[in-house]
Image (tube, rainbow, N blue to C red):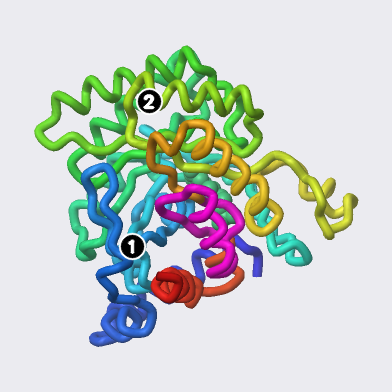
Amino acid sequence: MSPEKAHYFVTGWLTFLAKIPGISALLAACYTTNDKRLERKLFGLTFKNPVGLAAGFDKDARWFNELANFGFGFIEIGTLTPKPQIGNPKPRLFRITEDEGLINRMGFNNLGAEDAVKRLKNRKTNIIIGGNIGKNTQTPNEEAMQDYLFNFNTLHDVVDYFVVNVSCPNIKDLTKLQDTPFLLELLGNLKTINAEKKHPKPILLKIAPDLNNSQLDEVIDIVKQTKIDGIIATNTTTARENLQTSPKQIAAIGNGGLSGKPLKQRSTEVIKYLAEKSGKAFPIIGVGGIHSAEDAMEKIAAGADLVQVYTGFIYEGPGLVKAINKKIVNSL
Ligand SMILES: Cc1cc2nc3c(=O)[nH]c(=O)nc-3n(C[C@H](O)[C@H](O)[C@H](O)COP(=O)(O)O)c2cc1C
């Protein structure tokens, strides 16, 4: 089965099973680690535990209620765009099993922010839900600001925190929006709008692992200047280094963002750099190549306050969340 079909097959089953009385409670009992010591208070929110599901898995906020049964402390929905869009032509998701990685060029396939609101209003879980926002592929970069502001206003009442995604390598020129002048303006505008809302929401920025140190220095400055609430490090990489998979196979797959084990080291380096260089001035959510409890501990040691998983969750299964939480408790 193609990886994308497998995704819908599994989530379809999950939704079906969750409708059977008692199944959700059973799953939650198997996978959840209830321990007060796992609780994390960050940017005004209380996370039941520090392990989250990264953006892209539940782009349209269709399964977060069911996914919450796997013991996550938080789930990030999106990336959502103002208008629905079908994304890039298929196939666009590839397993590179020898490296325990994935290459994707989904291209923000989603049903649009307004559609997601309907389901987010019907929230049954009490875990934290983040909203990851982007721009439509058709929107030129010069008009990108409007897309982000639209998403922010549309989702404001139904998510607990926001993530500004300017780091997806699969939307033409999106990563150019990581330039300082645009980010200062965008994040400044979001902060202003946020301050006028009855319940302001934390705003984080998600960055690419492909930024160099001077670009990371700029990111630190941006956080300081705009006073946003934190950074998510990192998105997928365009690099194809140190892979076991043959260059021929990699070339045949083509463009896309690489995630999973091959991303682990670079993502940890970025977290460490941001934490050390800033003097741990802001919260960091660490994501990239966490396939085991030890990998998560590495991210935390590097400076991550919370962690997220995506590819590791696919390869290792839902037991990964519990394994990480148990390891954290045992390390205390
Ligand atoms: C199929 C797929 C789709 C993704 N879609 C998004 C997305 O829409 N928005 C986003 O910010 N990150 C997206 N990501 C990136 C993940 O959230 C995460 O940052 C990255 O995969 C690194 O973590 P991992 O190695 O645990 O997968 C996606 C990743 C994958 C594999």
Q: In the picture shown, does residue 321 fall above or below 52?
A: below
Of 75 and 321, nearer the camera is: 321
Total count of labels:
2
Q: CA distance from mark 2 to mark 1?
A: 29 Å
Residue 302 magenta-highlighted: yes
**In the image, what residue occupies the spot 49% across and 39% down?**
275
* Residue 129 location (% of width, % of height): 29, 53
Q: Which mark is residue 187?
A: none
In the picture provided, is 170 more to the left or to the right than 329?
A: right
Asked if residue 224 is among those painted magenta in the image, a careful observer would answer no
Specify the farthest residue to the left: 198
Mark 2 surroundings: few (<14), some (14-19) or many (≥20) residues within 10 A: some
* Disc ID at residue 73: 1
Residue at mark 2: 147
Please identify, in this view, whether the residue under mark 2 or under mark 1 is nearer the observer.
1
Q: Is the residue 12 above or below the residue 122 in the image?
A: below
Q: Amino acid at mark 2?
A: Asp
Q: Start and end of the magenta stretch? A: 287-310
Q: Secondary structure at mark 2?
A: helix
Please provide percent x and percent y for residue 325: 41, 71
In-front residue for pair 254/217: 217
- Picture residue at 61% right of the left edge, 36% below the top: 169
In the rendered structure, which amino acid carries the disc numbered 1?
Gly
Image quarter where the C terminus lies is: bottom left
Q: Is residue 8 left or right of residue 91?
A: left
- Name the residue: 29% across, 43% down: 161
Of pointers 2 and 1, the one earlier in the residue sequence? 1
Note whether residue 91 is visible.
Answer: no
Which residue corresponds to the image point at 32% horizontal and 26% vertical from the top-left? 227
Residue 223 locus on image (x, y percent): 40, 27
Mark 1 C-beta to ligand 1 under 8 Å: no
